[in-house]
Image (cartoon, helix red, strand yellow):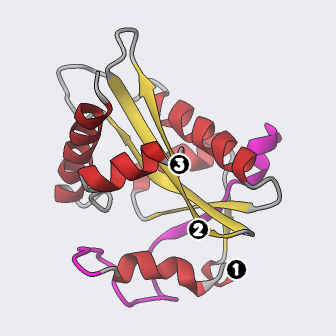
Amino acid sequence: MLKENIAVTIADWTQSEADRGKMLPKTTKEILTELSEGRGYVLPDSEGAPIAYCRYLVWSPELIEVGSTVVDPNPGEGKRRKGAGTRVTLETITMAHTKLLSARIIGLTENPDSEAMITKMGGVVKEKSAIDPVVWELCAKPGQECSHLGEFPDCPCTLFDLTHLAYNDK
């Protein structure tokens, strides 16, 4: 499958999830950039079609955020609840760690399903004040429909420390 087609598919998935209030949508251009820069990871099926996607953002040399995890929402395909989200997230954590070995790796979500997945993986809940407020700028990006726009530090997102998962040390 062509990278452009994969990006369109993933952008559609993120929009579908955004429409359900589960995540911020991503554009095809954002996804193509993340893939081209090696900051996005696609988990393929046996035929090369995407099953799941995750990316990381470098906020500073000391801080990386892993997120925007999305699994094919097509109910007819039955790809959810089979570990694809966990696998793609762990692979992305490894990619991020390889990029900046000493950076702290975090995840942010207000989606209960994502919180459960990250907790099961071994993510450690932290106070939101433990990270640089520049991270919250994503929510204030023009055109974002973030439900917690401008609410830091009262944002309903849960902050997870994922750094130790890069070392396979839960």
Q: Amino acid at mark 2?
A: Leu
What residue is shown with label 2?
A: 159
Residue 3: quadrant of the picture: top left
Q: Secondary structure at mark 3?
A: loop
Q: Nearer the viewer, mark 3 or mark 2?
A: 3
Q: Secondary structure at mark 1?
A: helix
What residue is shown with label 3?
A: 39
Q: Residue at x 76, y 62 (%)?
A: 103
User: Is residue 137 one of those drawn in magenta?
Assistant: no
Q: Nearer the viewer, residue 119 or 69?
A: 69
Q: Is residue 40 in sight in this rendering? A: yes
Question: Mark 3 or mark 2, which has the lower sequence index?
Answer: 3
Q: Magenta stretch: give its range.
A: 142-170
Disc 1 to disc 2, how far (Cα)? 9 Å
Q: Residue at x 30, y 74 (%)?
A: 146
**Residue 130 marker:** 1
72 horizontally vs 90: left or right: left
Give the main secondary structure, helix, strand or loop, of the magenta stretch. loop
Q: Is residue 80 in sight in this rendering? A: no
Residue 78: quadrant of the picture: top left
